[in-house]
Image (tube, grey):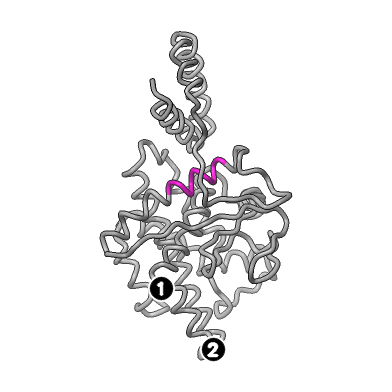
Amino acid sequence: MGRGRGAGILNLVLMGFLRASPKGKLVMLAIGAVAFLFFRGPVMQLLSGGATAPTSSQITANSGSSSTNDEMGQYLKTMMADNETVWPPLLAKHNVPFRPARMVIYTGSTRTPGGIASSGMGPFYAPAEDTIYLDPTFFTELKTRFGATGDFAEAYVVAHEYAHHIQNILGRLKQLHGQRARLSKKEFNRGSVRVELHADFLAGIFARQAENTFQSFLEQGDIEEAMRAAAAVGDDRIQRDLGSGYVDPDSFTHGTSAQRARWFKLGFESGDITLGEQIYTMPYEEL
């Protein structure tokens, strides 16, 4: 078997392993052990062909952060690669050219062109750089502080941030920030809520299209995990349960728990990018 073909097969196996649940990984390891015993020769030939793990030039790790080659780094590479596979054909249907996003993995804090960013900010997207910044310790906080458990909760976070990149391509982020000087704080916050709910909607579309593109991308309960993760970081829930206890709707910037889960679900169920445009035109109270 040739070098390129062998590498391709092992890359597909590794990407499937990284996407799998803990139970799925155990099953894959067991099957792999049996296969190695019976087909040791071909397997060794495959390995000697120079197969390498899937890589992406779009993801880097800052000094002091976890390596892009550890399990989390490989998982993030896989998720970035999945987005880069799913979005180009979806945008092409609407004659929109695609450009890939970058991801910077950091721990604690990192320097950006806009200044110093800390992990307390959570994952964020910098439109001027087409870059997602992510401290992997946020995934631990998502489970322990916000109560959003499950592997697919992490996939939802990456899909949501990549959705901001798609919004950047579509011009939605430029449109919002271009209005900042002439909008009141309340009006700008409402515009931000619309953008965030649209990102949740696009994350749902990604999940649907990824399931159609990759074999066994979703497992039973994955969509529910994503919806719980979306709801866990709703503004009302954060203010009520993790903040002062006082809920101030005028200060919302991301939407309520119910809104975030609803729009993710609508994106997944519809798979229609154009349907999400109504978020920007419908009355705010109906979001």
Residue 237 left/right relative to 20: right
Q: Secondary structure at mark 2?
A: helix
The answer to which quarter of the image holds residue 181 is bottom right
Q: Residues within 10 Å of mark 1 (few under 14, many from 20)?
A: few
Q: Secondary structure at mark 1?
A: loop
Choose between 230 and 128: the one closer to the eye. Answer: 128
Quadrant where the N terminus is found in the figure? top left
Residue 211 left/right relative to 126: left
With respect to residue 219, does 225 lie above or below? below
Query: Could you give the CA–CA distance between mark 1 and mark 2, rounded to whole angstroms?
Result: 18 Å
In this rendering, the count of numbered labels is 2
With respect to residue 79, does 104 lie above or below? below
Please state the horizontal and vertical placement of residue 239, each as a whole percent of the image: 63, 69
- Looking at this rendering, what residue extends furthest in the top direction? 38
Secondary structure that dominates the magenta span:
helix
With respect to residue 225, does 46 lie above or below? above
Mark 1 highlights which residue? 171
Q: Is residue 75 magenta?
A: yes
Q: Residues within 10 Å of mark 2 (few under 14, many from 20)?
A: few
Which residue is pictured at 27% across the width and 64% down the height?
Answer: 94
Which residue is pictured at 63% across the width and 60% down the height?
Answer: 122
Which residue is pictured at 42% across the width and 73% down the height?
Answer: 172
Residue 253 left/right relative to 174: right
Q: Amino acid at mark 2?
A: Ala
Quadrant where the C terminus is found in the figure? bottom left
Mark 2 highlights which residue? 181
* Image: magenta residue range: 74-82
